[in-house]
Amino acid sequence: MVEGRWSHAAPLRRVLDLIDAREEAWARIFPTAIGVGLLAGGAALGLHAGTHLLQDLLAPLMDGPAVLALPALGALAGSWVVVRLLREPPGHGVPEVVRAVCREGGRMHPRSIVSRWLGSLLAVGSGGSAGLEGPIVHSGAALGAFVGERTHLDDRKRGILVACGVAAGIAGIFNAPLTGLAFSMEIVLAEVSALSLAPVVLAAAVAAATDAACKTWRREPLFHLSSPLDRRAQPVDRRHADTIDPRDFPRCWRSLNITVDVEAKAKEAEAAQEQRNAKEALRCAEEA
């Protein structure tokens, strides 16, 4: 009887052991996925801000003949940084990421974090006709590989962290977490499972939230949407100079029974400037 009981309980024990192992794997990979999302989101923000800053610095030189030379010089400088200075293979970086996951257990060199990041900043910031997707994918993947290496994860989980870095990088640079999720699952991992999907979703969401929080810090929204229930709860602020009637919007919007107050901040600033000009003219007239 005892042997019969143990024989019937053996499948249940194996299931419980499998659940415990998965819970342990989830408990380790979730915090690292959040960290990768923060790092890759920060790298995407830095790349976006650095590119625009370089464009602003070089804007005075774009009026003369340098408008043709600057993009070429920026491309040469970016290529030199990637190939000569940091000794990375040429290319936009996505094939290297796929190769690292499929053949190298998610291992990437730490210099890959900054190689294409810096090269694309120089090339795109100087007016080059290039994009930021490949560089941020490569940098985010290298960040995921670096975190996986430092936390001593196995090849499987390190590959998942590489996908987390890819999804977080795309979510941070383009504000498109679903695009980053689809790209990382279809191109980088090429498979979908619960253990791989949940960390990638978490990393992409963290990166998108980081991007939104940094870009909207201490900034008022341009458009304010309010419903009739909000209007009953408290009076609508009419500080601004102009609003657009809801009837100006498409019929499909009006059928939702939502009142849309669009505050024209540009017109408000123009009206305030006109008031200041009128007061200044009146003061000058009184003094004369």
Image (tube, rainbow, N blue to C red):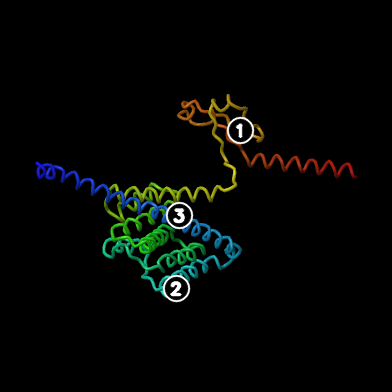
**In-image side of 14 versus 271 (left or right):** left
232 is higher (above) or lower (below) than 196: above
Whether pointer 2 and pointer 1 mark residues with C-beta atoms closer than 8 Å, the reply is: no
Pointer 3 residue: 38
Q: Secondary structure at mark 3?
A: helix
Could you tell which of marks 1 and 3 lies nearer the N-terminus? 3
Farthest-out residue, front = 2
Q: Label 1 amino acid?
A: Thr
Q: Secondary structure at mark 2?
A: helix
| Place of residue 69 in the rendered image (x, y in percent of width and height, measured from the top left) | 52, 69
Pointer 1 residue: 243
| Place of residue 68 in the rendered image (x, y in percent of width and height, measured from the top left) | 52, 66
Whether pointer 1 and pointer 3 mark residues with C-beta atoms closer than 8 Å, the reply is: no
The Cα–Cα distance between marks 2 and 1, rounded to whole angstroms, is 53 Å
Mark 3 surroundings: few (<14), some (14-19) or many (≥20) residues within 10 A: many
Quadrant (top left, top right, bottom left, bottom right) of the N terminus:
top left
**In-image side of 86 versus 258 (left or right):** left
**In-image side of 100 versus 262 (left or right):** left
Q: Label 2 amino acid?
A: Trp
Q: Residue at x 59, y 46 (%)?
A: 219
